[in-house]
Amino acid sequence: MAKNKVPAVEGWFTMDAAEPRLLGSRCKVCGTFFFPKEADFCRNPACSSNEFEEVPLSTRGKLWSFTNNCYPPPKPYMAPAPFEPYIVAAVELETEKMVVLGQVAKGIEINHLSAGMEMELFLDTLFEDDDNEYIVWKWRPVS
């Protein structure tokens, strides 16, 4: 029987495999973008607004920084068992100019990455259990 594909974190991204989008928010007063979404107060120190709109964020950006992760993350974060090392990328979104972290696609070697290269968002499996395949956004170099 096919497993249900479900988001690993509800409401943080769309599940459209062809055109996935991170879901952020934008302050209606100062225009500052947030990811994950902000709903309580604007984190821009020059703004005191608490009015936000949900916005889909850019799907591409520049690789700002990256590192390899050789140990499983602490709870409440999920990791497959047995744990497999992976690369984490900090990507500066094209339009919003904010940095979003995410795993890098399997099969990409760390020595093939360089700061400033263009990256794109895609959906992939984070882990599975008996019933579900948990999906998350990841980054890969634009080919």
Image: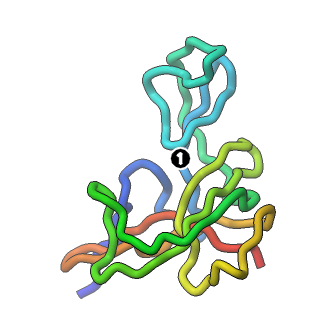
Q: Residue furthest top?
A: 48
Task: Give the residue displayed 59% in from the left and 40% down from the top.
Answer: 55
Asked which quadrant contains residue 24, the reply is top right
* Residue 94 x/y as whole percent: 76, 51
Relative to 95, say whether 102 is above or below: below
Q: Residue furthest right?
A: 116
Helix or strand or loop: what does disc 1 sit on?
strand
Q: Name the amino acid type tagged 1.
A: Leu
Out of 86 and 143, give the one closest to the viewer.
Answer: 86
The quarter in which the C terminus is drawn is: bottom right
Task: Give the residue displayed 21% in from the left and 76% down from the top.
Answer: 131
* Residue 28 x/y as whole percent: 62, 21
The quarter in which the N terminus is drawn is: bottom left
Q: Residue furthest front?
A: 70
Task: Give the residue displayed 61% in from the left and 31% down from the top.
Answer: 26
Relative to 116, say whether 111 is above or below: below
Out of 15 and 141, give the one closest to the viewer.
Answer: 141
Task: Give the residue displayed 57% in from the left and 62% down from the top.
Answer: 20
Residue that numbered label 1 is attached to: 23
